[in-house]
Image (cartoon, helix red, strand yellow):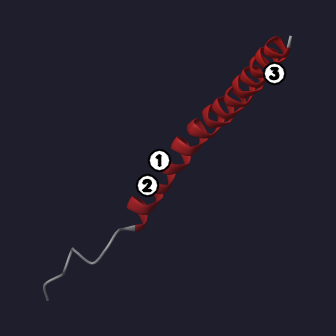
């Protein structure tokens, strides 16, 4: 009998893939959270500058 090797992934290949994916997510999530927090901070500063400009235009 001839064995067909192209039947799919082995359990070891799936475990390695999931491990790599998990490590990637662990590294990316904190940087994404920091980026979003920085974006919010920048947005708040931009809004404050915009309000200051509007106030100066009124005076």
Q: CA distance from mark 1 to mark 2?
A: 5 Å
Q: Label 2: state its secondary structure.
A: helix
Instruction: Name the one closer to the observer, 47 or 29.
Output: 47
Q: Residue 46 at x, y = what percent?
A: 72, 22
Residue drawn at 47 percent across, 58 percent down: 15
Q: Is residue 19 above or below residue 55?
A: below
The quarter of the rendered structure image containing the N terminus is bottom left
Q: Label 3: state its secondary structure.
A: helix
Q: Label 1: state its secondary structure.
A: helix
Instruction: Name the one closer to the observer, 23 or 54.
Output: 54
Q: Mark 3 and mark 1 in contact? Answer it, CB < 8 Å.
A: no
Instruction: Pick out the residue farthest to the left.
Output: 2
Q: Mark 1 and mark 2 in contact? Answer it, CB < 8 Å.
A: yes
Precedes in sequence: disc 3 or disc 1 = 1
| Left or right: where 31 falls relative to 4 | right
Query: Alpha-carbon neighbours of circle 2 within 10 Å: few (<14), some, or many (≥20)?
Result: few
Q: Is residue 24 above or below residue 52?
A: below
How many numbered circles does the render carry? 3
| Left or right: where 59 falls relative to 35 | right
Q: To which residue does mark 3 refer?
A: 51
Q: To which residue does mark 2 refer?
A: 17
The quarter of the rendered structure image containing the C terminus is top right
């Amino acid at each position: 009998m001839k064995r067909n090797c192209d039947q799919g992934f082995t359990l070891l290949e799936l475990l390695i893939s999931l491990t790599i994916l998990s490590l990637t997510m662990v590294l990316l999530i904190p940087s994404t959270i920091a980026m979003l927090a920085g974006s919010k901070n920048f947005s708040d500063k931009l809004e404050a500058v915009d309000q200051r400009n509007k106030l100066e235009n009124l005076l």
